[in-house]
Amino acid sequence: MDFSLTKEQQDIKKAAAEFTKGEFLPELAQECELNHQYPRELFRKAAKLGFIGLDYPEEIGGGGMGILENVLVVEEFCKADSGLGMALHLGYIPSKIIKTCGSAEQMRTYLAPLVKGDSIAAVSLSEPNHGSDLTHMDTTLDERPDGFILNGTKVFTTNAAYADFFVVLAQEDREAPPGKGMTTVIVERDPAAWLGGELEINELPHKMGIRMTSSGEVVFHNLKIPRKNIIGQRGRGLHNVLEFLDESRVEIGAQALGNAEGAFLKALQHARDRRQFDQPILEFQAVGHKLARIWSRLQSLKWITYHAAWLIDQRSEKTAASIPLFTSMVKHHVPETARAIIDETISIFGGYGYFLEQDVERRYRDNRIVEIYEGTVEVQLNNMARILQKLSPDFIRSTLL
């Protein structure tokens, strides 16, 4: 059993860390945070160095690698800065639905510019009346001889204000049972790509964290799109989304892992440097024990995240049914534990930890959304319980434990 990263993976992790040292400047983070500004130029720089779309096909400019390599980059980016790291990752992760379910032409059209840093993606799933429940959509898709017409409203769409294209889940068959009859489609921002209708985008302001990204309401008014914008097989839209979520949940977990690691490193340095009663506060047992417990928790988060990514990359017929059990575990356990870790680091900083300049309070705010998007932690527990009920006890005993 070998827990070490390959030489190539070590190089990727090192390169990502070096990139953040040169480009994740505190002044840039402060500017983007306070002005609610997306770091688009930083996204382009990351793309030019190959950090965007590491697991996308080489034919369209991607790295041709796996989810684990992507996890390593997301971890390093968020370790360096939660806001910048999450913003860069959120700029391309929505396009994974096209990577997993799209056609070769769609990948060339939408993913090739993205991996070069020339475009940004968004995914529109949640609706005012459908958040955790994706088994039926109020947004509708109606077929016409020359295309399809979208009507409805999506909320909490990340990157809404500046995304170049949106991946949208819509209900095509109104009479289908829950989870059936839905289709995923691509909607371009450029009106020249539409056949009629209107796309309305409204920013949702005053949010708690990830303030470097836009969160918006996206409204489709009889928006007519070409037939070529259908992703995968019609009627299997929810299946496309679930396949996407199996990968994305592990990468989202890597956001929380990096956020917590970065907070720990700052707290450790502060505990070494800060002196009270003529000694570093690290020498006080109350502070030392906090850091020791954080270290133990971080190790558990790191290895379950890496393991889940490895399982996806090594997917086989035997393990396929159990992979969602591990991806849901990561999406539940890592963000929730990371929140507790970051909260402890704020305590180590004392009053200073409550202010933006020390960075840990921003990490707490940024990380809070990781427990919610891509499926709440409670939904993940439901997923795990359902899968455990279905899996053979012998398989759990002999293979998973």
Image (cartoon, rainbow, N blue to C red):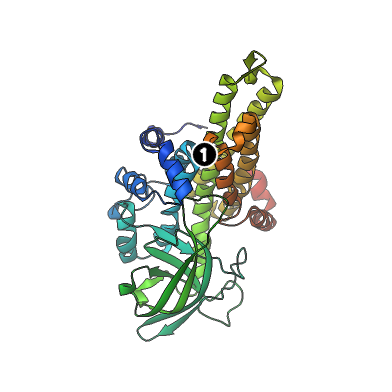
User: Helix, strand, or loop for circle 1?
Assistant: helix
Q: How many marks?
A: 1
In which quadrant is the C terminus drawn?
A: top right
Residue 92 versus residue 276 in the image, above or below: below
Res 106 → quadrant: bottom left
**Residue 100 appears in the picture as rendered:** no
Report the residue at 38% width, 46% height from top. 65
- Closer to us: 44 or 173: 44
Residue 278 versus residue 400 in the image, above or below: above
Q: What x and y, as percent, mark residue 20? A: 40, 36
Q: What x and y, as percent, mark residue 367? A: 57, 46
Q: What x and y, as percent, mark residue 310? A: 49, 43
Residue 286 versus residue 109 in the image, above or below: above
Judged left or right of residue 237, residue 346 is right
- Closer to us: 168 or 347: 347
Report the residue at 41% width, 35% height from top. 13
The residue under label 1 is which amino acid type?
Gly
- Closer to us: 16 or 350: 350
Residue 196 versus residue 202 in the image, above or below: below
Judged left or right of residue 321, residue 55 is left
Which residue is labeled 1 in the image?
A: 258
Q: What x and y, as percent, mark residue 58? A: 30, 51
Question: Within 10 angstroms of label 1, few (less than 14), some, or many (20 or more) residues?
Answer: many
Judged left or right of residue 336, residue 14 is left
